[in-house]
Image (tube, rainbow, N blue to C red):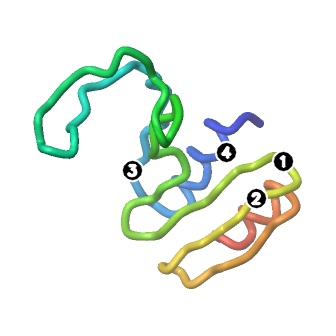
Amino acid sequence: MNKQEFYEHCATLLDVHYTHNTIHDVRETASRDGTIYTPTTMHSRWGPRAPGNGRFEGHGVIRYFNSQNIQVMLHTPDIHKMCGSHEEVFELLR
């Protein structure tokens, strides 16, 4: 099971809409004075990643580091735990 399939299954168990983010394009950014510009590279404080994967609206965050290291931080239901497998996460969400 890859990350996208894992997150989609978690969304199904939480009964929430989820869209996997695969965009790594350079996007317009606001400078400190508020002007909009397009950076010449994707290098920034956050690197080339686009935030969003593992975030479940109204529930919290599930971070998939690898298949043996998955962090669950949900406020609905109230779960804060490090899990060692996909199945352990799915059992918590059920």
Could you say whether the residue bearing mark 4 is in a helix, strand or loop?
helix
Looking at the image, tell me whether mark 4 or mark 3 is earlier in sequence order.
4
The residue under label 2 is 70
- Residue 17: mark in rendering: 3
75 with respect to 65 (left or right): left
Q: Is 29 rendered above or below residue 56? A: above
Looking at the image, tell me whether mark 1 or mark 4 is earlier in sequence order.
4
Looking at the image, tell me whether mark 3 or mark 1 is earlier in sequence order.
3
- Residue 28: mark in rendering: none
**Residue 87: which quarter of the image?**
bottom right
Q: Is 24 rendered above or below residue 87? A: above
Task: Work out whether residue 30 or residue 62 is closer to the camera in this orientation and state it.
Answer: 30
Q: Are marks 1 and 2 in contact (CB under 8 Å)?
A: yes
Q: Which numbered mark, 1 or 4, is in the foreground of this view?
A: 1
Q: Callout 2, which amino acid?
A: Ile
23 with respect to 80 (left or right): left
- Residue 67: mark in rendering: 1
15 with respect to 78 (left or right): left
C-alpha separation, residue under disc 1 versus residue under disc 2: 7 Å
C-alpha separation, residue under disc 4 versus residue under disc 3: 14 Å
The residue under label 4 is 6
Looking at the image, tell me whether mark 2 or mark 4 is earlier in sequence order.
4
Q: Callout 3, which amino acid?
A: His
Task: Work out whether residue 36 or residue 6 is closer to the camera in this orientation and state it.
Answer: 36
Which quarter of the figure is the C terminus placed in? bottom right
C-alpha separation, residue under disc 1 versus residue under disc 4: 10 Å
Residue at the spot 49% in from the left edge and 68% down from the top edge: 60
Residue at the spot 30% in from the left edge and 25% down from the top edge: 27
Q: Is 37 rendered above or below residue 52? A: above
Rate crowding at label 2 as few (under 14), some (14 to 19) or many (20 or more) other CA atoms within 10 Å: some
Q: Callout 4, which amino acid?
A: Phe
Could you say whether the residue bearing mark 3 is in a helix, strand or loop?
loop
